[in-house]
Amino acid sequence: MALSSEQQQELQTQLQQVVVACNERCLYFAAKWSAELLNSFSSSDDSTTDDASDTDLDDDDDVPAPLQSTNPDRKEARLETKELPRYLVAKAFFDCREYDRCAAVFLPPQIPHTTPAPQITSPTKLTVSMTPQKISSGRSTSKPGLYAARPQAPALPKKLSQKSLFLALYARYLSGEKRKSEDSETILGPADGPVTANKEVSGILAVLEKHFNARGGIQDLGNSQGWLDYLYGIVLLKAKSENLAKQWLLRSVNLQPYNWSAWLDLASLLGSPEELQQISEHIPRNIMALFFHIHCNQELYQQTPEVFNSLSQLQGIFPRSAWLQQQKALLHYHARDHETAAHLFDSLLKDHPHRLEGLEIYSNLLYVLPNRPRLATLAAMASNTDKFRPETNCILGNYYSLISEHEKAVLHFRRALTLDRNFQAAWTLMGHEYIELKNTQAAIESYRRAVDTNRKDYRAWYGLGQGYEMLECYSYSLFYYQRAAALCPGDPKMWAAVGNAYSKCNKLANAIQAYKRALVVGSQIDNATSSFASGGSDPLAQAVGGALDPQILYDIACLYEKDSNWDEAAAYMELTLAQEEGAEEGDEGLGVTQVTSRARLWLARYCYGCGEWARTMELANELCQDGVEVEEAKGLVRDVRARLQLGEVEEEGEMDE
């Protein structure tokens, strides 16, 4: 995928425009993302020498002219010009984090602070050309009776530009978030969580509903620039009205496709690849849709060739994009290609040594490998860059966890959440530490907050299953393990956990099926979705030797033993034992382990009960060499020898007669 010089120049102009527009509305994250993308094009300037003449620079026709922040809507442009002095002071207040003062420049002070949230309805009926009502996922958690008290929307100035209205309402929204954080007090305290809400949401919803109703509602796309639609979407999302939020965010990305923050909030509402496929019909067909699909597939743990192909195409246009390189590293990380992911993260860190975005995941990778020296170096680099970033504290928390100082790890994860309560990775990692500290209740609450922030985090769902398993609430743990396995079906650990939970619930057939699914996924057999309960050929027959997990094989055998299916139990014990040797000639097996030794002991007992004395002697002698259950193995050897000697004596007696 290559762009012509005209297409590239047009894209650069659009990115410049959106950087200016986002900065004017104080959407600094979106502005930063677009500005970084703007500077990641392949450019011949990299090879230009410092002594280039001024004439050469003057003759460069490929450099777009500087932009002026003009609005193409003439009416809006006149309003913005008229409001310029007030806008400048309002933005100065915003930049100094004086959000209430910023909002008061344009809005009357009677916007409610403490009234209940309004009945959430969409301005007029939702029938637009992109038919967003068809993509409703049914995931809305709003309750009609909860918002019965509806505040009266305050009177707005008759002539106020959309840019100024956005800035004022966005400042009001952030003011509410700031108060909410202050009222929440300590992390995991009594006031932390859903009990403390943003009290500005109801007033903002009332203002925006009145604004859009006065301009034809969602049907009329011509009276909006996409920014207020985005704000309406995130406030609806905060009010738990997810279906309406999805529709307004869709409208926003169609009207203003280069606002990356709108794409991210829209992606947070998608819970499955099917939902992504469904919504793809209603998003604009431009380069931003490719970025959106890569982000969503990465969030949904989809490592398909199509995703990598799209990523390669975009890297051909933006070869210096740190974001694209980070996504590539994340895709390899989720595919458990840890060495490639680590190499990509190292290159990213070398090219952008002060960039902290996504480095908490790199620290997770270094924790798993484990690579303590590299993790210590990463922690020092992040601390030197900015000690008061959530990413830095997550990296430090992972480092202290790796050296088994779990109390210090919890302290740093709590610091990360104090800086940003919506930093989902810190909630999950703090839950892991509380599991290590045997503080089950705190771990469960941490994981709950993690899934509230991001319902696609299978590690948090898995952690909830672990927590309830520790409390011996096996039905609950089964539910959460199933959620984790559904989100990440390619991880055998998830299916093994499901199988263990089924066995604890005494559902042996389901447990065996889940364990077999774990084996199929782990051995990377193509037919990973086979139904093992069916009478067809077992795909495990294709994978013997060193390709399977001996612990899972042993657990399956024990379940068959519990179900009194001795032949299947013996077959899986033999498979467990086979993992000591390589799958093919030249391959190295696992060697003798505790699990394979237990399987050998079980088989020795089984063969003894079946009267297979030669096989029993062979297995018992091997157990004596393994050094596992030596006394019982010696007892079996003595017993078998005595029986064999007794048999020989009886045979001699019969011959004498």
Image (cartoon, helix red, strand yellow):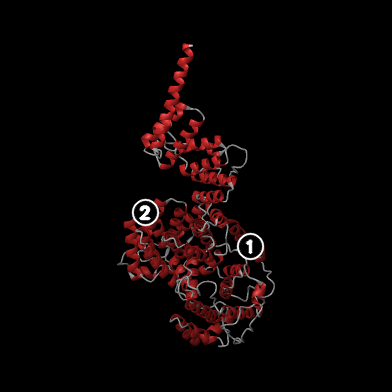
The secondary structure type at the circle numbered 1 is loop
Task: Return the mark for residue 645.
Answer: none
Mark 1 nearby-residue class (10 Å; few <14, some 14–19, many ≥20) = some
Q: CA distance from mark 2 to mark 1?
A: 40 Å
Q: Nearer the viewer, residue 304 or 415?
A: 415
Q: At 59% across and 63% down in the image, what residue appears?
A: 283
- The amino acid type, in three-letter code, at marker 1 is Ser
Q: Nearer the viewer, residue 495 or 55?
A: 495
Residue 87 locus on image (x, y percent) = 50, 84
Mark 2 nearby-residue class (10 Å; few <14, some 14–19, many ≥20) = few
Mark 2 highlights which residue?
A: 370
Residue 492 locus on image (x, y percent) = 50, 48
- The amino acid type, in three-letter code, at marker 2 is Pro
Q: Nearer the viewer, residue 587 or 106?
A: 587
Q: How many marks?
A: 2
Residue 147 locus on image (x, y percent) = 64, 76
Residue 68 is at least partly visible in this image = no
Q: Which of the 4 quarters of the picture holds residue 517?
A: top right
| 2 vs 1, front mark | 2
Q: Are marks 2 and 1 in contact (CB under 8 Å)?
A: no
Q: Which of the 4 quarters of the picture holds residue 212?
A: bottom right
The secondary structure type at the circle numbered 2 is loop
Query: With 163 as the anchor, is 592 left or right in this view?
Result: left
Residue 380 is at least partly visible in this image = yes
Task: Return the mark for residue 137.
Answer: 1
Q: Nearer the viewer, residue 133 or 300?
A: 300
Residue 60 locus on image (x, y percent) = 40, 67
Furthest toward the top, the residue is 657
Mark 2 or mark 1: name the one nearer the start of the chain.
Answer: 1
Q: Is residue 71 above or below residue 445?
A: below
